[in-house]
Amino acid sequence: MENNDLNIKMVDICKYFPGVKALDHVDFELKKGEVHALLGENGAGKSTLCKIIAGAQPMTSGEYYLFGEKVTGLTPNAAKEKGISMIYQEFNLVPYLKVYENLFLGKEITAGPNLNKKEMIAKTIEIFERFQIKIDPEARVCDLPNAYKQLVEIAKAVLENAQVLCMDEPTAPLSNREVEILFSLIQSLKNEGVSIIYISHRMEEIFEVADRITVMRDGKYICTMDADKTNRKELISLIVGRDLTEEYPKRESVPGEEILRVEHLSTDLTKIHDVSFSLHKGEILGFAGLVGAGRTEVMRALFGADRKTAGEIYLYGKRIEIHKPENAIEQRISLIPEDRKGQGVSLTLSIRENISLVKLKGKEICSFMGINRKKERNLADEYIKALNIKAPSMEQLASNLSGGNQQKVAIAKWLAVDADILILDEPTRGIDVGAKYEIYLLMNELIKAGKSIIMISSEMPELIGMSDRILVMQQGRLVGEISGDEVSQEKILEMASCG
């Protein structure tokens, strides 16, 4: 290969897993100093392609040229030595090590026989100054919010002087301000000649940062185009292989009676202060706020996952006690958490086992004889079909599913207990536009069936498009409620960042 403008050239790449053709004769090129967006539905093959580029997965067949040289048998360490770094959707950090220890893990600075802690901390501070953000180098990673963990991941890659940087959904846990910082960093890296492969389902980001866009579908290459020569509608059509007439499906149902009331909810550990709100039957109630505003913490306290220090909860006008998740489940309240890999699904279990997991304490599929496998399979089959979970069989391990299908399994698990109130924390994070639409349709069907939904989302168009009312939080407190014609992104941002 003799094109000096190309850092990467991939020809006819195939990758097979048992029962799955993840990549089917894919071509891909990455120019020096460009941001190249990879778009496609979950399961399209984007992450698999990047893992091959970074040496984390071997290709089954095809040709891979890196900086003009053909490479085979690439390992992650060899890829790093050649200048490739990968930032995965899942954090690749050691939780109980400090920030600076994570940054220099495997490449520690020494002074004679000892570690040079002072210099490593100084270099950590220096790199964070490029981010224009303050992170304590001696803080333990496990004590950081997700947004800061993501920035630590990016700092690791920058520290390694990567020439090719793969970013898989890098802005998912970031606030708007932190996204601006990331985009500024991407621009400076581009100016230094670094090439960036950028995977995101957020269309507005693609048009802001990408020079070129490659669309993939079902493991196949569809097309590559300049970002300034296409538009949102065309991209969505290419990604899903069909036209989506509306991003947010219309709903005709009207919220009814109040079914849930929370009064003066407070927690000590997570610093929630005097939060009161109500939820009506057949309503989608949105919760907005910046990262760290306390939205997730309110729902964890409501669900009994965190201990509340004050407050009362009323269901259908009757005061109830929720001290642990089992109490909430008994009251037909469910929580689909933000962290699908850590809390939403059990990665080492199959789809079938995940879906039936919460029901194992009941009598529907269990008896003194054990688990009724026929009933368990029927239950799993029902929700696999209802949510269009894509997998070779219900015995597929959750760890082998795409992010979107993992999220569907997490939702299916809680739908299976037939809850009246569903709390959805970032339900479409990391999910492609086609799968998002399926989730929105499902939400509308649940509302039509008389269920009620509380939805936390950092995507304001999603909140506006799906919610009947929106509550805004800031620093652990509710600061306002908006609905109807009052609702706008500007109004939400103003309320979320005031003071």
Image (cartoon, rainbow, N blue to C red):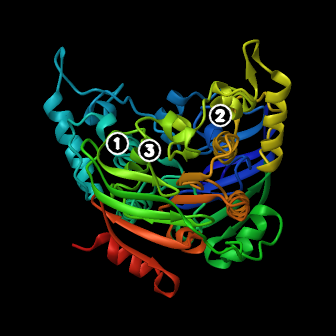
The spot of residue 317 in percent (x, y) is 48, 58
Foreground residue among 420 and 453? 420
Per the model, the C-alpha gap separating discs 2 and 1 is: 24 Å
Task: Please give the residue where the numbered disc 3 appears in the rendered image.
Answer: 162
**Which is more foreground, mark 2 or mark 3?**
3
Residue farthest bottom in this picture: 485
Left or right of 74, for residue 262: left
Quarter of the rendering occupied by the C terminus: bottom left
* SS at circle 3: loop
Question: Which mark, residue 205?
Answer: none
Q: Is residue 72 visible?
A: no
Check the image and name the residue furthest to the front. 318
Q: Which residue is mark 1?
A: 159
| For residue 440, side relative to residue 463 (left or right) | right
What is the CA distance from the residue labelled 2 to the residue labelled 3?
Answer: 17 Å
* Amino acid found under the numbered disc labelled 1: Leu
Q: Which residue is mark 2?
A: 71
Image quadrant assignment for residue 361: top right
User: What residue is at 60 percent from the left and 56 percent from the top?
Assistant: 428
